Image (spheres, grey):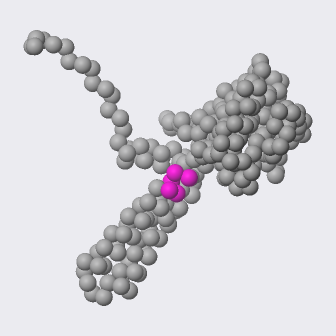
Amino acid sequence: MARNKEKAPKKPKEDGRIKQMWQVFQMTRRYDKNIVPFLLLSLLGPVAVGLILALIFGEGNGFVIAMWIVAGLLAGFLVALIVLGRRAEAAAYGQIEGQPGAVGAVLRSSLKRSWRGSEMPVAVNGKSQDAVYRAVGRGGVVLIGEGPKSRTTRMLEDERRKVLRVLPNVPVTFLYVGPDPDSLSLAKVPAKLNRLKPSLTKPEVLAVSNRLTSLGAGNLPIPKGVDPMKARPQRGR
């Protein structure tokens, strides 16, 4: 082998898990002032429970007491990670709330596997940028209006007629994401979908989704969704 063989360029080193978690925490803290007390409570709560159980069941056995304490620490760390993840997601969604394409970002990144949705809307008002998004799952077909109800209701009704024309026996549900007091926030859209009463089987979900996709959305002025999980706060000067 030649001694002067060129070395392959090294791949950039990815950030470690601890560094990634710290970056997520820093981003969340900028938009969620309550993240620190929530994390402390979620961490110290299980630790306190572990200490209490150690005193009750330890009976002076140092090994048993240590195991209960370690179990409390591990449980606290796990709960804190879950809390951080949910608060970070809510903070990220808060940054894009009200922007065109925000609902599409939620459908792309936060739906469970039992649901099929696209970041691209099925109908758009080119002037107001109001849009209608569609998701298909065990709860049937869900049409989500992005914008004020006064402007999106008619758009939703038009899309429902299109769905029922080809799938007359599939339930269609309306959801609204906008400035109205009774509209959903972005963070609550996935939970709302998951609470819908199942009416389709998994094979039926796939068939309905494929059938609706084959209809196409036409030539629309479609705003591409933004990704809330890639949102980054501006650095302070």
Most extreme residue toward the bottom is: 59
Quarter assignment of residue 213 = top right
Return the residue nearer the eye: 153 or 19: 153
Q: Position of residue 192 (x, y in %)?
A: 71, 52
Q: Position of residue 99 (x, y in %)?
A: 70, 34
Q: Quadrant of the N terminus?
A: top left
Is residue 206 left or right of 133 when viewed as pictured?
A: left
Residue for point 73% across, 31% down: 211
- Is any atom of residue 185 visible in this view? no
Residue for point 52% across, 51% down: 85
- Magenta segment boundaries in residue numbering: 82-86
**Quick check: 236 above or below 127?**
below
Return the residue nearer the eye: 80 or 25: 80
- Is any atom of residue 237 visible in this view? yes
Most extreme residue toward the front is: 203
Residue for point 47% across, 61% down: 79
Dominant secondary structure, magenta: helix
Count of all numbered marks drawn on residues in the image: 0
Q: Position of residue 47 (x, y in %)?
A: 41, 71
Q: Position of residue 59 (x, y in %)?
A: 30, 88
Give yes or no for residue 197 being in the magenta stretch.
Answer: no
Is residue 66 left or right of 3 when viewed as pictured?
A: right
Residue for point 59% across, 39% down: 109
